[in-house]
Amino acid sequence: MRFITDSLSCCSARLGVLTGIDRLPNVSFETPMLLLYTRRGSVPHLTKDVLKKLTAEQQFLLTNLPSTILMTDCVKQFDSFGEFVGLQEYPFFLGIQDPSEQVEKAHHRNGSVSVWSRNGRTTVTPDKYMDLVENFKPDVYVTLFDGDTDKDSSQKRINKSLCTSKNLFSACYKKHQESDVLRNKGFLGAVVGGYNLQARAESIKHMEGKELLGCVIDALHRNGIETQGITIDQVKPVIEHSLNLLPVDKLRVLNGCWNPSTILDLVNLGIDVFDSSYAFLMTEEKKSLTFLCDDCESCMRVERRFMVDLSEKRYKEDFDPICKSCTCLTCKNHTKAYIHHLIHTKELLSLVLLMIHNTHLYIEFFKQIRQSIKDGTFDEYRNKIHSRFLQMTENS
């Protein structure tokens, strides 16, 4: 697998192509790229048939250990995790933690990582993890690491995270190199160190000279909905420092429920890959995203230019779609009043319709990001979305 970019700058918006997926040789993905968030191998609230109707374009799916680790024995009976969940035509990215769920603090032991599933805590060692990876056969996966740090972490916790992650990386990388099954899969290192720049540099130095597809910049937060409130000013020094030390020709991944305004700032720094957990969590809050709408009168109102909460009473008799200019299946066939009714009668269809719209909009969002970089209008595009996000926060 290869990542190709013509950017020679460490910290600027850039375009690239991810190609050479061994089982899908004719498929390539442009970056900045969106990974569609899945839980237990499927996009939440959407069946496979609905997912295929949502977009005809090939998508890269993100799965994670917390939602899939209990499936390990079942997956062994199939050729891969993709075949087990019936989505073998899609490439999969395997992550360590669920970006939509806040990670429990601590509970890590030397030489292992704690993963929290529905059955509680599971201790994952490099041997156990790499056996799972060989069974799952994801197209891209990240090394096992201890990312249990955030802006409030002590130096002691950061040092332990760094030491554990270095040992885990060495063990996983050795097994990756020795495995005939994984040799052609994309292997990513993890950059840890909390908000300590020296620790970040040491984490990167430990991976120098290794054959990696790229790196995941992690250990900045504990995932979950709170990630959307992290501002670019809080993380910019750490991310800039990390990117300046990483090779420019490697893929840079940053998972988490970042809000769209911050995503644009992160793209501007040179991050290549994100996930759609924000769209999922907004769906869970009964909110529909509208920040891409430029010509729908109801969406252009100041208090509705970024998202609308369809559980609010004002939508009880609103017989317009979420956005008149949106081409998703929800907006083409249903009204805000209908979705409002479904929410208040606790019909599961409300989440299906919201997930269709929010996921469609997020896919379009990344298309527009790539096009604006190609056209040389990225700064103007970023400023436009920033303005809408600022109006939402000022009116909330």
Image (cartoon, rainbow, N blue to C red):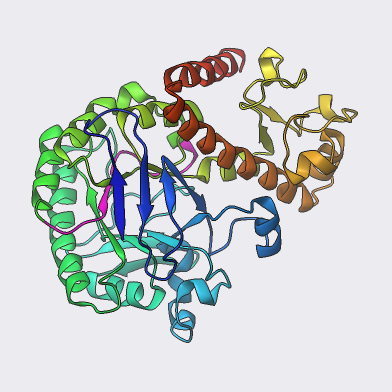
Q: Residue at x 43, y 30 (%)?
A: 374
Residue 72: name its quadrant. Answer: bottom left
Q: Where on the picture, by quarter, is residue 10?
A: top left
Rendered location of residue 394, percent (x, y): 56, 12
What secondary structure is the magenta-colored segment mainly?
loop
Q: Is residue 117 left or right of residue 162?
A: right
123 over 311 or under it: above or below:
below
Q: Depth check: give the residue in front, 26 or 359.
A: 26
Classify residue 199 as left or right of residue 106.
left
Q: Is residue 115 magenta?
A: no
Span of residues in magenta? 210-226
The reply to whether the magenta stretch includes residue 223 is yes
Q: Can residue 295 be seen in this view?
A: yes
Q: Answer left or right for 317 relative to 359.
A: right
Instruction: Give x and y (percent) for residue 181.
Output: 30, 78
Residue 80 position within the rendered picture, expressed as x and y whole percent measured from the top left: 45, 77
